[in-house]
Amino acid sequence: MNPDRHHPQWRDWRWQMQHRVHDEPTLRRYINPVPDELAAIEATRDVFRWNITPYYAALMDPDDPDCPIRRQMVPRMNELAPDLVGVVDPLEEVAHSPVKNLIHNYPDRVAFCVTAECAIYCRYCLRKRMVGDAEYMMRRAEHRAAIDYIAAHPEIRDVLLTGGDPLTFNDAHLDELLGALRAIPHVEILRLGTRLPVTLPYRITPALCAVLEKYHPVWVNTHFNHPKELTDDAAEAVDRLLRAGVPVGNQTVLLRGINDDVTTMKALCEGLVRMRVRPYYLYQAQLIGGTAHFRTSIERGMALMEALQGRTTGFAIPKYVLDTPFGKVPLNRSYVLGRAGDHVLMRTPRGPLWAEPNPLPPGEAPGLTLPAVRLPENVATIVTGVPRREEPLLHRQG
C-alpha cells in the first residue's frame, strides 16, 4: 500500500495539501477500511468533513481499525451515537469574541483564529463548528479588524495565532500577519498553535523558519497525541524550529483507548523530551457532540498523572487541565472537589465552581475514587448546550 510515498513531490507541503485523502477510493490506497468506517464516511458527510495528509495517512496501520492514528482521523459510526449534550462551543468562544474569530477570554491574552483551514480534521476537534467552514474563513479586512482590536487594548501582551491552523498560510501571508502584530508595542509574545509538525512536517521549511525568526519572541505549541507520531520527519521539523530560536511545547488531548494508559503516555512524553519538545498540557477531551467515545473519566486522567509522577523526568510530565469558560482548571486534588453522579465538581481559578458532565464510561477502571459531593445551587455547568455563568464576559467589562 501507499505508492505515493515514492512520489518525487512527497516532501513538498503544497503537494501534500493538494493530495489530501478525503474519499473512499483514495483512503483504500492507505488502509483496508472496515464496514463501520465505510458507513461512517457516508453518514457523517454533512456532520463533519474529513481530510488526511498523505504523510499522516501513511502512519496508519492498514489492517488495524484500532490503530491510534487511524482512530483520530477516519470517521466512525459512534460519532453519531447519542451524546450528553449537543455542544458545539463548550468554551463560549463565540461569546468571548469582540470581533470575528478573536477570542478574548483572559485579560492579558487573546486567541486569534486566523483561518478555518487545517491540514487534517481531527475527529475530536474542539472547533468542529468552524474548521473547514467558509463562514469562518477570514478576509483581509477581518484580519485588520482583529489587529486593530489588539492594538486598542494595551492589556493584551500575548497573542496566540490559531485556527484552523495558521501554518496553512503561505510564508508571505504569515509574514504580513506577524509583522502587523509585532508592530504593536504592547504585544510581547507571539505564539502559534499548529499541528503541522505532527501531520505535515514538510511545512516547516527553512524559509518558514526565517520568517518566524524575524519576529521573536515567537513560540510554537504543537499537538502530538501518540508515540507513533514521533517520526524522523517530525523530529527534523522540530529541530528546524529550535535552530531558528523557536521554543516548542506540546499539548496532548487525553483520548480513550489511544493514549489513556501509563505505558503510552510515558513513551509519548519521554519521546517528546528526546526531540526537545516540552510536554506542556494534557487536555481533558471537551464535550463536543459526537465525541463521547474519545472521552475518559477525569478520575482516569488524574490516576494517570499520579502514576507518571516519580516514574519519569519531572519536566516530561505535562499539566493535566480542563478548559472551561472560566479558564483552564488544573485537574488535581487542589481544584477537583469530588464527583456528584455524572458530574465532577471543581473550583476554577476565577472563583466560580464548575460542574463538568463526565459520567464514568461503562467498563472503565478509573484508577482512583473521588469524594462524593452534592452540587451547590450556584454551580456553573453545561445545560442543554448552554453554560450558566455568574460573571460578565471579559471583553464586555469596562
Image: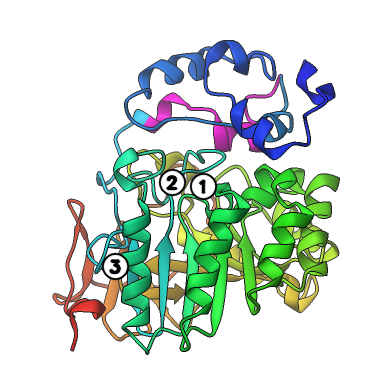
Separation of marks 2 and 3 at Cα, in angstroms: 17 Å
Residue behind mark 2: 361
Q: Position of residue 352 (x, y in %)?
A: 26, 81
Relative to 83, is 63 above or below? above
Q: Answer with left or right where residue 107 lies relative to residue 19.
A: left
**Is 389 a magenta residue?**
no
Residues at badges 2 and 3 in contact (C-beta under 8 Å)?
Answer: no
Callout 2: helix, strand or loop?
loop
The image shows residue 191 at horizontal and vertical percentages of 56, 70
Report the number of discs: 3
Q: CA distance from mark 3 to mark 1?
A: 21 Å
Q: Quadrant of the C terminus?
A: bottom left
Q: What amino acid is labelled 1 in the image?
A: Glu
Secondary structure at numbered mark 1: loop
Name the residue type under label 3: Ala
Kindly identify which residue carries mark 3. Answer: 355
For label 2, count other residues whose C-alpha is less than 10 Å away and answer few (under 14), some (14-19) or many (20+). Answer: some
Q: Which residues are magenta?
A: 63-79
Point 67% across, 66% down: residue: 212
Residue 354 to residue 384: above or below = below
Q: What residue sits 58% from the left and 34% below the top?
A: 71
* Amino acid type, residue under disc 2 in the picture: Pro
Which of the 4 image quadrants contains residue 380?
A: bottom left
Tag 1–tag 2 contact (CB < 8 Å): yes
What is the CA distance from the residue labelled 1 to the residue labelled 2? 5 Å
Between residues 324 and 379, which one lies in front from this camera angle?
A: 324
- Secondary structure state at the residue bearing disc 3: strand
Task: Tell me which residue sits at (67%, 64%) in the image.
Answer: 211
- What residue is shown with label 1? 364
Q: Position of residue 49 (x, y in %)?
A: 42, 30
